[in-house]
Image (cartoon, grey):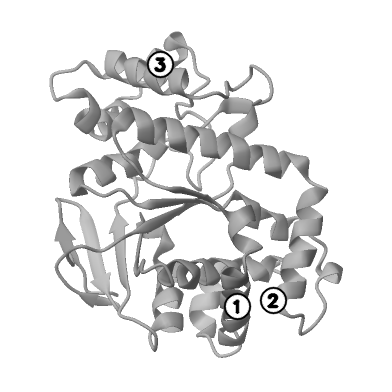
Amino acid sequence: MHNVLVIFTGLEVRVNNVCTGMPQQLRYFMGFGYNPDLGRCGERLDVLDYFRWFAIAGWNPVLLDASAYYIVNRMSPKKVPEGCSAERLIGIIMDELGKKPEIAENSLIRREYLAAMGGCLGIQGRIVDAREMMVSHRYIRALEEMLEFMKVADEGTVGKLLPKDANRASRLYIPLELAEAQYFLQEGIAAKFGPRTEEFFDDLIVEALRKKTVYTTVWCPSPPEGIPTGYLRGTSGCITFSDSPEQVIAKLRDEPYRSWMAGVIRPFAGPEARVEEAVIAIMERINAQNIYRAGAGDAP
């Protein structure tokens, strides 16, 4: 059990896993993972929950689209030689990504949604595509170090992050994520934001970077159990940006979901706004800024 300090009525802050107040003048990054329903349904509205915290805290974080990491879950372990160097691994990963155009499309769609959300809601975060980041010399050097770190990493923590059927390819997901933290550290970004469900990833980041820096992790609370948000729970029942106003109204008849969504949109709509009307208005604003339309064809 970690000691944490609750700030901004919900955020939890750790500096090297120790309870602390919010450090001043830090730069943050947040990663957004692969959403398999993005092309079919559009982005999930619950992503706005993270932008809500950015607005409350006054942050303009780096937003990393990490969709490309998903490729390691689609690769044969035979593609990954034992003891493979970081540079060769990235070459293999990029070759495999070239065979999966749906992942490239996913990254393009995600980038457009993040840009549209930030633009409409006043969050001026820089967006980084993992596909571009991974081929940089800085990232490859970071990955080399993290592959070495994985040889001594706490197996208990690693085991909590991997599925039981993890293989040599899918296990790469962890060092890829660790390397991103070191990559951003070299830009002076020594803090990561995310949901509390990333606790074990964050533990490994702190462990991996302990000799290099004092590292800050900030968690926002996960939605209550039963709330139909998409993150790690599938998209059934949650609002997506392809939904019609009638679909939005129908989904908000779930009272716990409606109550939670009211809190998500409050910084952008005001406390007096009717939830249904405010959600539809925010979706229309964001969709109007987004060059991609879910269900309307490919992005240009």
Query: In the rendering, which numbered label is found on residue 56?
Result: none
Task: Give how far apart the Cα atoms at labels 3 and 2 are.
Answer: 43 Å
User: Which residue is denoted by mark 3 in the rendering?
Assistant: 284
Q: Is residue 204 left or right of residue 174?
A: left
Name above or below for residue 192 compared with residue 2: above
Tell me where residue 62 appears, x and y as whole percent. Answer: 40, 53
Q: Quadrant of the N terminus?
A: bottom left
For the residues labelled 3 and 2, say whether their Cβ atoms are less than 8 Å apart.
no
Q: Is residue 225 visible?
A: yes
Task: Name the one closer to the observer, 284 or 174.
Answer: 284
Tell me where residue 256 appears, x and y as whole percent. Answer: 30, 31
Q: Is residue 85 left or right of residue 278?
A: right
- Frontmost of labels 3 and 1 is 1
Residue at image point 51% right, 66% down = 180
Residue at image point 68% right, 20% down = 297
Total numbered labels placed on residues in the image:
3
The amino acid type, in three-letter code, at marker 1 is Arg
Q: Helix, strand, or loop for circle 1?
A: helix
User: Which residue is denoted by mark 2 in the rendering?
Assistant: 86
Q: Is residue 63 left or right of residue 145?
A: left
User: Which residue is denoted by mark 1 in the rendering?
Assistant: 141
For the residues labelled 2 and 1, say whether their Cβ atoms are less than 8 Å apart.
yes
Q: Is residue 168 visible?
A: no
The mark nearer the N terminus, 3 or 2, is 2
